Image (spheres, rainbow, N blue to C red):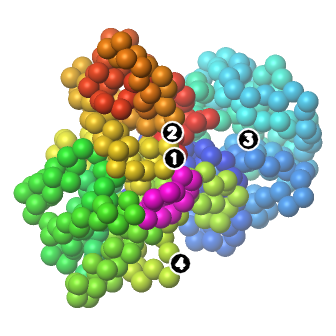
Amino acid sequence: MNNKKDLILVLDFGSQYTQLIARRIRELRVYSLIEPCTVSTDKIKKIAPKGIILSGGPNSVYEKNAPMPDREILNLNTPILGICYGMQAITHLFKGGIKHTSTREYGRAEMYIDNHHDLFFTLPEKITSWMSHGDTITRLPEGAKKLSHTQQTPYAAFSIPKKKIYGVQFHPEVAHTEYGLQIISNFVFRICGCFPSWQVKNFIQETIAKIRRQAGKDRVICGLSGGIDSSVTALLIHKAIGKNLTCIFVNNGLLRKNEPRQVRKIFKEHFRINLKYVNAAKDFLSKLKGITDPEQKRKIIGYEFIRIFENEAKKIKNVKFLGQGTLYPDVIESVPFFDGPTAKIKSHHNVGGLPKKMKLKLIEPLRELFKDEVREIGKELGLPEKILYRHPFPGPGLAVRILGEIDREKLALIKEVDAKIEKIIKKHGLYKNIWQAFAVLLPLKSVGVMGDKRTYEYVAAVRAVNSLDGMTADWTKLPYKVLEELSSEIINKTQGVNRVVFDISSKPPATIEWE
């Protein structure tokens, strides 16, 4: 069975939720693909999707140069679902009415369902929806039927039955919308007629075959950090080309406490993969001296990684490829996705830091996957639990968890604080239930009192979040007892920190990492 036979195409109009739409579809075991909103109808015909979803976006349809899909997609006889801006784009193309409203509807809104056929099949009369719009539809397109409304939005959803076209003003892809996944499920299965054939086992087989074709008899080097992304990448490539893979583990001095020793032990003893260890801590710290801007940090670290890989590659014959554990969220947060209108948030060292004239070609088997999908693949590949359930760690490492300039003193401090957080979280049996827990060292000092003496030391922030895919996250409500123990352990046993704060920001509007 073809793993991608039934496919839903998502057209990106610039929403930060575009990847989340694709992720929700994959939760339903249907493959999803993202293309820019400017993709041609001819290319869409070649892709042959069972359905098309138009994402949200920051623009207004009546603005000059507002992004619009190729009008011909409306005549493909393929079901279409427009979300937020996507709904307004459909309305605009069908000559409906849209205007800016003085009252913006943002956040949770009670939505009343007027028609339960197809899109809202099996849903209750009223649900909580997540709205984010300043424009509203004042006149439905010709042939359209009203499906739902809120107190402020007369047309919260509509359908054009003859063309199997649907529009929703709210965001069914976010967790804040009740029955959001059911709405997407109704579109994918009831309207588009998809079959749930997207499976991890199929992905593994197809990816190994693809890597084998891509690499041929050439050698591949892979940057191994010990995190789940690079570990799964290394195992997939290893299964495809065996001894032609050499993994390079770079100690950049920005890793967690005892990390270099643990990673080397696991991969040399457990998987017997060719592993080369490079201690480049001095080089990285030298390049980062005096740098405070987080974007500069990321780019410097990314460039330095590639420079080291290229230097190491010269020592190995026939190396033509570099394997990387780039994920979908890395891509969406780094660049305007597929040259679409999505706003850049921050660069990732796998994406934004690559030099334009890099001599190695890339192999990125996870580029279209989300973190939980990668973890599922890791299980199938037999990764040990200490890597499988390890909390995500940023590519630039502790460089983006030390706000401001980096030096050896700050690195030593944050490594100790971070190790204490992990130890206490594990002690209370919370580690597997938390997506990510870590320390951030703030670029300021505060006055404290220890043993009747005045201290003037650093402030450490504790950050703990829960998430499915890293695209959205809620701060974790740690028990007071755990917070108390964290504060006591960090302050009393880490010389240089005299104050601990707890971050209670969710994503959005914050990001998971501070930089």
Return the x and y of residue 146 as percentages of the image width and height. Answer: 80, 32
Q: Nearer the viewer, residue 213 or 463?
A: 463
Whole-percent x, y for residue 136 in the image:
85, 35
Which of pointers 3 and 1 lies earlier in the amino acid sequence?
A: 3
Is 64 placed above or below 138 here?
below
Q: Is residue 118 above or below residue 265?
A: above
Identified by mark 4, the residue type is Lys
The residue that mark 1 highlights is: 404
Binning the other alpha carbons within 10 Å of mark 1 as few (below 14), some (14 to 19) or many (20 upward) gives: some
The residue furthest left is 269
Which residue: 61% across, 51% down?
A: 345
Q: Vertically, is 296 above or below 248?
A: above
Q: Whole-Å distance between the Cαs marked 2 and 4?
A: 33 Å
Residue 350: assigned label: none
- The residue segment tinted magenta is 287-301
Crowding around mark 2 (Cα neighbors within 10 Å: few <14, some 14 to 19, many 20+) is: some
Judge depth for marks 1 and 4 and give the one in front: 1
Which mark sits nearer the N-terminus, 3 or 4?
Answer: 3
Q: Name the image quarter holding the N terminus.
A: bottom left
The residue that label 2 is drawn on is 443
- Residue extending furthest toward the front: 453
Q: Residue at x 20, y 54 (%)?
A: 260
Q: Residue at x 20, y 46 (%)?
A: 258
Task: Measure the alpha-carbon separation of dots 1 and 2.
Answer: 6 Å
Position in image of residue 183 (x %, y %) = 59, 34
